[in-house]
Image (cartoon, helix red, strand yellow):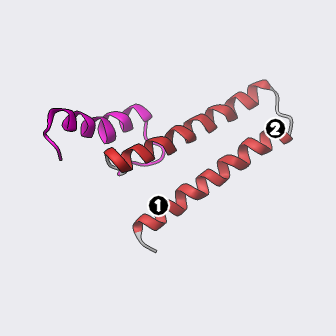
Amino acid sequence: MTEAEEKAYVQGARRAALTMLQHCAGELGYGTRESEHARWIVEREEAVQRLRDLCREFGDNDWPENMHLGDVIDKHLGEYLRDAKTGRGR
């Protein structure tokens, strides 16, 4: 398996786990507080997936899943976008 295939597999597995989490929390009847925590997890995971897509096209994906999202935006996407805007390129 290539590195790209392995990354795609891991991202797919995370997406599947996230879908199961959403479904299970509802089926188990968790209250508002617990479901709110699950919603935060879901929201973060969806943001990470969207950042991965944008970074694949406009930046780099050399960052761990648990990296602070602000750092991801700044260091692995924003720098590339700023360089493209100013014509510097990488």
Q: Which mark is residue 7?
A: 1
Does residue 32 lie above or below 61 as drawn? above
Mark 1 nearby-residue class (10 Å; few <14, some 14–19, many ≥20): few
Image x and y of residue 53, in percent: 44, 47
Foreground: 57 or 21? 57
Residue at image x 25%, y 40%? 80
Q: Quadrant of residue 31?
A: top right
Image x and y of residue 29, in percent: 86, 35
Name the N-terminal-most of marks 2 and 1.
Answer: 1
**Element type at mark 2:** helix
Q: Quadrant of residue 27?
A: top right
Residue at image x 23%, y 33%? 82
Q: Main secondary structure of the magenta part?
A: helix
In the rendered structure, the answer to whether residue 39 lies left or right of residue 66 reads: right
Looking at the rendering, the stretch of residues picked out in magenta corresponds to 62-90
Residue kind at label 1, given as amino acid type: Lys
In the rendered structure, the answer to whether residue 39 lies left or right of residue 65 reads: right
In the rendered structure, the answer to whether residue 18 lies left or right of residue 53 reads: right
**Element type at mark 1:** helix
Image x and y of residue 86, in percent: 15, 33
Residue 28 lies in magenta, yes or no?
A: no
Residue kind at label 2, given as amino acid type: Gly
Which residue is outermost to the left?
88
Inter-mark Cα distance, 2 to 1: 29 Å
Does residue 10 lie above or below 19 as drawn? below
Mark 2 nearby-residue class (10 Å; few <14, some 14–19, many ≥20): few
Which residue corresponds to mark 2?
Answer: 26
Foreground: 59 or 39? 59
